[in-house]
Amino acid sequence: MRIIVVVVLILANTLVFAQQNDPELSWPREIIENEYTITLYQAQLESLDKNILSGRMALSVKKGDEIIFGALWFNARVATDFDTRIVVLEAVEIPEIKFPDVDDDSKIEKLKEIIISDLESMDLEMSLDRILADLEDVENLQMLNDQIKNDPPEIYFRMKPTVLVIIDGDPILKEVEKSNLESVVNTPFLILKKKNTYYIKGGKYWYESNTLVSKEWKVTKAVPGDVEKAANKMLDNSEEEPEGETTEIPDLIVTTKPSEIITTDGKMEYEPIGSTSLLYVKNSENDILLDITSQHHFVLINGRWYSSKTMKDGGWEFIEPADLPKDFAAIPSDATIASVKVSVPGTEEAKEAAYEQQMPQTAVVDRKTATTKVTYDGKPEFEKMEGTTVLYATNTESTVIKVDKIYYCVDEGIWFESSKPDGPWIVSDKRPEEVDEIPPSAPVYNVKYVYIYDSTPEVVYVGYTPGYYHSYYYGGVVVYGTGYYYRPWYGMYYYPRPVTYGFGVHYNPYTGWGFSAGFSYGWFTFGYHSHPGYWGPCGYRHGYRYGYGHGYHRGYHNGYRAGYAKGRYDSRNVYSRRSTGVRPTTRDRGSNMPNKSARPSNRANNVYTDRNGNIYQRDNNGNFNQQNKRPATRPSTQPSTRPSQPGTRPTQPATRPTQPSTRPTQPVQRPSTQPSTRPTTPSNQLQRDYQNRNRGTQNYQNYQQNRPTPSRATPSSATPQRSTGAATRGRR
């Protein structure tokens, strides 16, 4: 029993895996306490419900030649930093500890209280990639589909370089100061008009046309001097030229409708995909597959699959994820086109992406220093959202809603409130329940995914899930954008709304959604009136123009990672844009750090525990050998769904909504018993745990090997600024 006492007491000081002591967060971890060696093996995670992570962990205690094995169960609140891909588990609870070969369980139960008390003020650090890989069952996700729109946009197919230029609705022209020129306001591209001729600057080339919305744009070198002079002032010239760009001059398609372009370098060249009945088009930076059986082509756009037998413009239809050919799920993980598996329901890649949809980015907001400012184009105007009691402001680029007599502004993942539409604004410590009524047809739909978890008189604990930057869950996969067209505001100023189509959006598990509109042609250039409203809170990550190249087919390092490494913004953490008033929840734990910390162990990371607490060690032949002599029984009580709050933080009132799953309108309770569909044979479950552990380790290593070091964006340097007048001023 002395061994057990040591284990319990040491655990209270060792479940903090400090990154500064272990930069690689390697497993297993061990603690030396006098003559005892306690080894903690990598956690086996069971569920992620709201912001609560639950799992179990195998451990061993060795004294001399004697060794015993045990298991513990835990629940914890997650605090996530997507930039470092580190997750801190706060307010850890350990409702159950088992040593199957030890009789005196009563003493363990008594000492369990000591562990819970000590761990409430400590944090456990884990790799995000290992967490995503180890979550066991997609049914645990309990995520309901967003009611989004999937109607196909206008899809153009061309067998030569072609760039799509999107105008947000009917063209709006404004005068360029001190000139006889006009510019098109409602587009992120630079389009100028002189007399009856339109000009577009793309990379090194100028295009001209007498008709704006047209496919007949031609390259010209006869550009009027005043047009070139105006362009030099209006363009963002801070971009470097991408490496390996094509020398072929691309065609243009200018359109006012939601559209996408897919291109190939000449006639389509096909490559077989393993032993499946699928081929992929290898001379395209788009993800294009051919199903030999049906003779249909499939293209992946914004996480959605569209199919056509002819590839003709306008001949595409949306394919429900569940209706994809079965061979899509059988694409080998090492295939060149394997990245599309993240958009195939039921695959491990899709499951991990779905779990990340629930993983919140978190921060702590200082009530005294955090604030915001809202500017309207004239007097504040509000519009009611269909089917709700909530109103939203239409004539501002800020996200402002009105609930009863209170105004709320969501700015960079923080809720603010005021009794007046233009402030002054204070940090809100309550998320209005009516927010859950907001439908995806409303342009402010994404605020449903910004949450308030807790508060003290000094700070408010906040977070948001990927829905905030327009990443949604549908049919077992993640997709970008709601698919709805939102009418922009135009008065004295132009305020765009979020768009779904037109910019070649692709998903990458390490960096989220990136854009690829004409980048490999060295073409894409923003005008000075480019506006973050098009792409939401995370903005447009310019760096992706460098790395996208030929899409995923260039490989992990030369694709998104290369682009991200040169990007101007942080990946998906909008909190990092604030210089004051916000700090990460992965805070400096200072005085909470224990005297003893876990160190890397030279033992193999090959010990597992099943759901009952039996301990198994996997040998080199792939066999799982039970280490405990007496069979363990399942814990009599399931881990609670809500860890105790730290003593320094008040418990959240029961009437305040906690973070819902992806669709907040129907909060989901964690089941009191595990689903009956889970495998009951230990070897099956343990084999899956082994595969998850290996996959998580590989993902973690991939990230570390290619880990970018982006500079921190600040509102004064990298983040697109709010309109102050001249940039987007127009005429009625």
Image (spheres, rainbow, N blue to C red):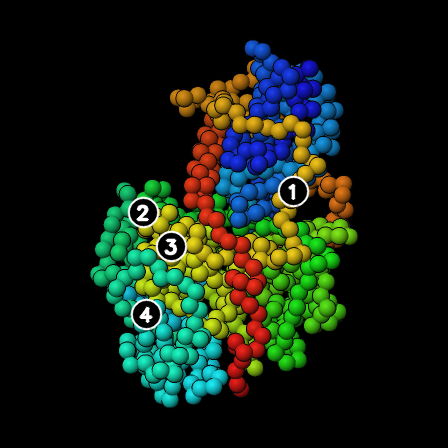
* Chain-order first, disc 2 or disc 4: 4
Identify the residue at image location x=28%, y=78%.
220
| Horizontal relation, residue 286 to residue 393: left or right | left
Residue type at mark 2: give it.
Answer: Thr
Residue type at mark 4: give it.
Answer: Lys
> Which residue is tagged 1?
588
> Which residue is tagged 4?
204
At label 4, counting other C-alpha atoms closer than 10 Å, the crowd grade (few under 14, some 14-19, many 20 or more) is few
Task: Report whether residue 449 is seen.
Answer: no
> Which residue is tagged 3?
547
Q: What separation in Å lies between label 4 and label 3 (alpha carbons)?
A: 19 Å
Place of residue 465 in the rendered image (x, y in percent of width and height, measured from the top left) = 57, 53
Foreground disc of the pair 1, 2: 1
Q: What separation in Å lies between label 1 and label 4 (alpha carbons)?
A: 48 Å
| Residue 336 image label | 2
Between 634 and 253, the one nearer to me in the picture: 253
Residue type at mark 3: give it.
Answer: Gly
Identify the residue at image location x=41%, y=24%.
622
Foreground disc of the pair 3, 2: 3
| Horizontal relation, residue 616 to residue 666: left or right | left
- Image marks 2 and 4: residues in contact by CB distance under 8 Å: no
Residue type at mark 1: give it.
Answer: Asp
